[in-house]
Amino acid sequence: MTEPAQQPLTGYNFAYLDEQTKRMIRRSILKAVAIPGHQIPFGSREMPLPYGWGTGGIQVTASIIGKDDTLKVIDQGADDTTNAVSIRKFFAATAGVATTERTTEATIVQTRHRIPETPLTENQIIVYQVPIPEPLRWLEPREVETRKMHALAEYGPMHVQLYEQIAKYGRIAASYDYPVVVNGRYLMRPSPIPKFDNPKMDNNPALQLFGAGREKRIYAVPPYTSVKSLDFEDYPFSVESWEHCCALCGSTDSYLDEIITDDRGGKMFVCSDTDYCTQRQENGHFGPLGSEAAE
Amino acid sequence: MYVAVKGGEKAIDNAHRLLAEERRGDPESPEVSLKQIDQQLSHSVDRVMTEGALYDRELAALAIKQARGDLVEAIFLLRAYRTTLSRFGASEPIDTAKLLIRRRISATYKDLPGGQVLGPTFDYTHRLLDFSLVDGTEPEAAAESDGDPDTPMPRVVDLLNQEGLIESEDADDDTPVGDVTREAMTLPADRDVRLQMLARGDEGFVLSLGYSTQRGYGRNHPFAGEIRLGEVEVDFTPPELGFPVTLGEITVTECQMVNQFAGSATEPPQFTRGYGISFGHCERKTMAMANVDRALRARDLGEDVSAPAQDEEFVLYHVDNVEASGFVQHLKLPHYVDFQSELDTVRRLRADAQARQAGVAAE
């Protein structure tokens, strides 16, 4: 579903932020692109949405969006989750841009916790909402220390943590926000996407921008840049998998959400990416419950 | 059978309508006016202006009304509005020595030039619910001072300074002052930035931290050198004029703490300072702020940094209630993708563990 462009809200600048602020943010974005994976401090503003609800992503989107852009906003992979709806409405109102749920029609995709299943292209930018940008934060709470660790590429403690998980559980137990190394240099937090999505970041043709509003940091992965999930030769990186296919579209290669259907252990699995699932059904792919739902 | 969270947009609109209806309450009872909030809930307005970092009583009252009296929400509303305002410059520093005093007390001297002026204070009220307020009674008129309002009220720290008993603080007009609303804070933070963060910081958090220093976590022996409340003019020098013009008058509360002395081989012992300031009348906040300011100077003064209130990363990164409130409450947002990922991991780990146990049992 695509909504056409409309007149932006009067009384506010295009896309809410004033032009000076946008310029400041774009300068930070340029620095971030020049040093892939490195966190750039920026003068994050108070937005009319709460910190922790996507203010970093919103500020990045606001500073790069133009009136010819088409915006898609997802949360947990879905276009219709409440906060995605709220952010999409914010830009439809303040920038008057066209919005869409179709990944292929979007020029900018703002996301929380997922990367779309449909591969992105060179003509697209994906903007991630980031709660905690620092990958070393759970190992070292102090910013002064973690900045030093990045400067010296002192990433041993992160490997030790993964090793400790193997020693304790027999496998790496990190499941989302799984640490990656960008361009062979900076350790980076991919934002809380499931590790299932990590491989999509590697060598992606789209520009990937990350905004952390409360923590006042921006970082980036330029197009076609290597993004490697940390692992060991004998314990290689692996992703989540399901014994089921999507109940609606029958997909066996997408990330599935588990839906509890009753209080007797009944459950079903459906695609987290609602657009991907809808497209498949429109193209005649159905899962065990798909045709029933389609009627 | 699959009922997803479709219709989010409609649900949000309906929730907002319900909120507006509940905000209004019983339509039979008269609606509260901004003037009433400003006049009769003035301390709420003062706090919202201080932590909202915007001096505008009417907008603060509006924010309080819109937030149904939730002051942290009102502070957020005011901050979000504040960021949209264009700024045309910085005012001249206000001169609190020239404050038109409504209240001025010192705990370090029994009497001092200008005297002790109690002003409007809860301090010596007995905290008994006053049932005469239930239906409203007109208060007795307050007595008026026959003193000369132009009596000079020198600041206690300036009196101490004459003898060199307290560290002197000379304004350095050449170094630009930081601005936490325009640039990301970097650490170690200088005192200008620390004071800005504390002034905008959450009263409850600052109060508890200030309290902790008095209970031994970073003790620094505070004396309330002076607390003053009053009106002061704000001057601005437009570049095209080249001389200052008065923009208006604001009410501020200022607290100067006199703290334990420090000295070294080269410098004789002197008292040190802690500073707190707020818009309006926020006495509790400014006193606590002064305690925390002094605690955060531990590094500068060569003291051990061991207590939470002395730890600038801990204090400055957690003092802002707009940040804290947003991030704590973001846990309400859906996290089912992450949770699914965790479910997958826990199920695999449990399967591994069961396989190991079965293997042990089979042997």
Image: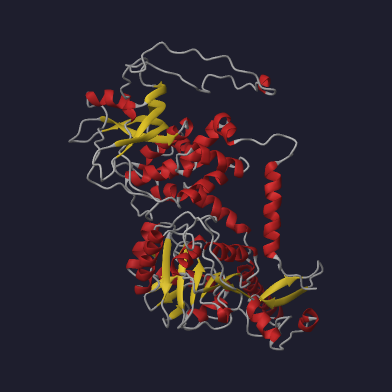
Query: Which quarter of the rendered picture does the N terminus of chain A lie within?
Result: bottom right
Asked whether residue A176 is in view, the answer is no
Specify the quadrant of the image occupied by residue A144. Answer: bottom left
Occupied quadrant, residue B196: top left
Residue B91: image x %, image y %? 33, 41
Q: Is residue B71 shown left or right of residue A152?
A: right
Give above or below for B354 relative to B174.
below
The answer to whether residue B161 is visible is: yes
Name which residue lies at 58% across and 66% down. Answer: A88
Locate residue B160 relative to residue B64 in the image: left or right. Answer: left
Residue A119: x, y in percent? 54, 83
Above or below, A145 relative to A105:
above
Q: Is residue B232 above or below residue A109?
A: above
In the picture provided, is A129 more to the left or to the right than B199?
right
Camera-side residue of B58 and B164: B58
Measured from the top left, where is residue B116 in percent x and y? 40, 17
Give residue B277's quadrant in the image.
Answer: top left
Most extreme residue toward the top is B146
- Please identify the quadrant where the C terminus of chain A is shown: bottom right
Residue A147 lies, in percent from the top left, at 36, 62
Name the foreground residue: A269 vs B88: B88
Q: Residue at x 71, y 77 (%)?
A: A269
Question: Foreground residue, B282 or A185?
Answer: B282
